[in-house]
Amino acid sequence: MIVMKFGGTSVQDASAMLHVAAIAEQYGDEQILVVSSACSGMTSELLKLATDSVHISDEERIQRIAVMENRHISIVSSLGIEEQVGHRIHELCNGLRNTCEGVALLGECTPRSSDAIASFGELLSTVVLQGLLQQHNASTWYDAREVVKTDSGYQVAQVDFSLTQSMASKKLKPLFDSHRIIVTQGFIGSDSDGNTTTLGRGGSDFSAALLGAALHADEIIIWTDVSGIASADPRMIPEAHFIETMSFDEARMLSFFGAKVLHPETIIPALSNNIPVHVRNTFKSADKGTTITQLGDKDAIGFRSVIGKQIVTCVNISGIPGTDYYNKKFELLDQISRLSGQQPLIHARVGESETYVYDAPMHHLSQCIDKEQNLMNITVEEYSLISAIGPNLRSEHSKKAVGKFYETVLSVDPQPVFISGIQPQTVSALVAPDCAIDILKALHPHCS
Ligand code: ASP
Ligand code: MG
């Protein structure tokens, strides 16, 4: 059994949905659990509608829901399945209208209402998708809230893994006896009172990993709009290629240092159950994509990808002797975190001086820094953060490649700050922002 997760762009319109149907066909007799996101943009629109319902007019609220309803109706009408599923779309949209009216009447949008409203995106997209798949396959629609069990932490609900696992094997698995394909929703679940919850933005990948683990799937395929995880950002480096296999740690480092395809943390349930996760392109289904496994390609040497964060801010702090700067320093760091909404990416300490690197431009931070100059020496500088990532850069075999990294960075920026050894998968440098692209271009040919 394979779990296939389709992201928002893979179900954004009729033509995208036809690609999904073709993929389901390519898999012949294989049993498939389809976990789908909402049509792209829907979740954001629904969340906005939820909070706006408190203050907009009845007409505007009704009008905005009509636009969403029409979008789905026009998809099913182009797919020629309006007769089969049109009524279900109307039913769901009636539910959405009622929930939003409730918010309007109460004049308050609670996190619980917000989750209930957000869930309609996935409920709608899956009704459409199942209607389409039904034409050629024995398929059924399944409400993920029946099995994905969470606490009541609305908007970022925590999953009860063992309950979800037992519900999935009791209720979901037997459906494969009579259906080749089951279509369900990502992102949504329910709490012990049966209220709808959501797993946080982008939560569908997590749903797929979770259900894959619960059902002991053979593999999980995350279908998206790019052909896997690339050796560099193709917009900057057109020669970038997709990496066939990588370890979970490499994927994690890539995402930490700037890659956007996948949040690797969300696939942990799959990997910790030894289920490989593939990232593939719905629109180019012949492309191999990237396979992520716990161990990855252990024999690979050197670095296999390069990535940059265009602007990071380095805050260097050292205390002025004789002053009681210690508590002030923590206050300052606290303030920076609140202002930037971030914890430092990197923290390094040499004796009494410390460096904190934040993934944010400087003007966000300077406001709180100015006030503290009398107790601490603080300097703030903007850099680009360039990183090379490979399975094990500490190994003897990778030494040459790491040497190349240092040499190449220095050939473009004579005064970088190297950061290495934090994780065995990465070596990084802080460089002048106007050198960043040239450095990435010079480094990429050294990817193994
Ligand atoms: N539809 C949800 C979102 O946009 C979940 C997902 O797509 O993964 O955040
Ligand atoms: Mg996503």
Image (cartoon, rainbow, N blue to C red):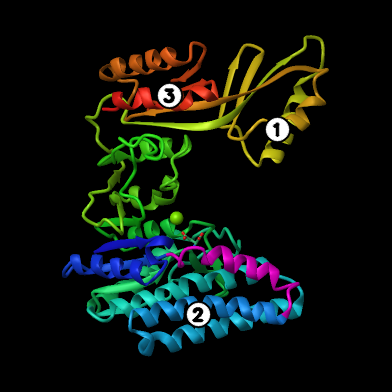
The kind of residue tagged 1 is His
| Residue range (magenta) | 37-57
Mark 3, secondary structure of its residue: helix
Quarter of the rendering containing residue 3: bottom left
In the displayed orientation, state which residue is furthest to the left. 28
* Residue tagged 3: 438
- Whole-percent x, y for residue 77 in the image: 38, 82
**For this view, does 243 lie left or right of residue 52?**
left
Amino acid under disc 3: Asp
**149 and 416: which is toward the camera:** 416
Residue highlighted by disc 1: 363
Above/below status of 148 relative to 310:
below
Q: CA distance from mark 2 to mark 1?
A: 43 Å
Circle 2 packing at 10 Å, graded few (<14), some (14-19), many (20+), is some
Q: CA distance from mark 1 to mark 3?
A: 25 Å
Q: Secondary structure at mark 2?
A: helix
User: What is the x, y in percent for residue 131?
Assistant: 34, 80
Judged from the image, the secondary structure of the residue bearing numbered disc 1 is helix
Residue 149: percent from the left, percent from the top? 48, 67
Q: Which residue is mark 2?
A: 70
